[in-house]
Amino acid sequence: MFVTETAEQIKSMEIRGAGRIARAAAGALRDHALSTSTSDNATFRQEMERAAALLVATRPTAVSLPNAVHFVMAGLAAAKTAQEAQAGVVRRAGQFIGSSQHAVENIAQFGARHIRDGDVILTHCNSEVALACIIEAHRSGKEIEVFATEVRPRNQGLITIRTLDGAGIKTSFIVDSAVRSFIHDIDLVIVGADAVTVNGAVVNKIGTSQVAHTAAEARVNVIVAAETYKFAPRTVVGELIQIEERPPGEVLGDEIARALPHVTVRNPAFDVTPAEYIDLIVTEQGAIPPQMAYVIIREYLGWDIGEFRTVFDLNSGHDD
Ligand code: RI2
């Protein structure tokens, strides 16, 4: 698929979810490399850099996107010819996509261990890793139940309840504002992440921090399922995660909005949950308390994206 097409689909959220966005970007870079016919190394590199920049600019919050792009683009580093560069990009894109799928499977196994027989779980938004944990617990024979929120304004909760229903899991569907009304029925909250900062704060779908705050007040544990490539290396040097603000039309129809000239619609897509409201972050490397986020960044991602080193490099032992 063309890079511009993938970029459009990520922007419009036709492709969504931090992990899926990352894999789609890696796949788009691979396809772009394969369709670029130049035999000049410098021109090839320029073309790839343009494509990478286009993809990274689509959505600003999910750090999995720049992390994936950076990982794939490192395939250009040692290449002396356009052909070598092309092979490097294709190889690393395949490596990223494969390792990402593998990470989701590992997290499902690790996460399911923290779910007990009889648990009622609350999830917010639609996270493939969070759902993978829940589905794995169900598959292993635990009797569980799920409460899923609606997730205004884009209603990702609908995707979640379809997936849970397909897996045969008993599910209650609630509006976002009903979380506190039901929190005493809940044993465990499991959500995904778009970014994890060095101090263990989790950036996830808007409303997550309200859910986590409510859970903390009720002494309900909160687990975040997040692959290591969702940790943000640049937060080590003080960089903040940019919170995407999406078009007002997602919240209020244009016609109604036009009739209310004094009203401004605000539509932040994500919020920040501080580490103290999170009990555990489950990664493919194992579960950590959020306060240990720095260790993941140091061990698997490097200090800064400029010296990006990932679990994929460590696993393969050699590359570039
Ligand atoms: P997985 C999504 O963002 C949600 O915030 C979700 O919790 C997070 O990405 C992680 O998703 P959006 O794309 O990678 O719906 O776990 O804005 O699927």
Image (tube, helix red, strand yellow):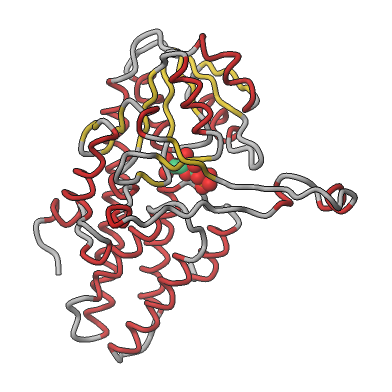
In the rendered view, would you say 77 is above or below 109? Answer: below
What's the residue at 13%, 53% (across, down)?
Answer: 314
Residue furthest to the left:
317
Q: How many marks?
A: 0
What's the residue at 46%, 27% (across, down)?
Answer: 212
Tell whether 257 sits left or right of 177.
Answer: right
In the rendered view, would you say 132 is above or below 51? Answer: above
Tell whether 247 sits left or right of 278.
Answer: right
User: How far across and down, in percent of the image, does residue 117 sit?
Assistant: 35, 9
User: How far across and down, in percent of the image, does residue 132 sit?
Assistant: 38, 31
Name the foreground residue: 26 vs 56.
56
What's the residue at 42%, 16% (across, down)?
Answer: 220
Picture quadrant of residue 111: top left
User: How far across and down, in percent of the image, does residue 254 sit?
Assistant: 82, 53
In the rendered view, would you say 194 is above or below 303? Answer: above
Residue furthest to the right:
259
Tell whether 187 sits left or right of 92.
Answer: right
Picture quadrant of residue 75: bottom left
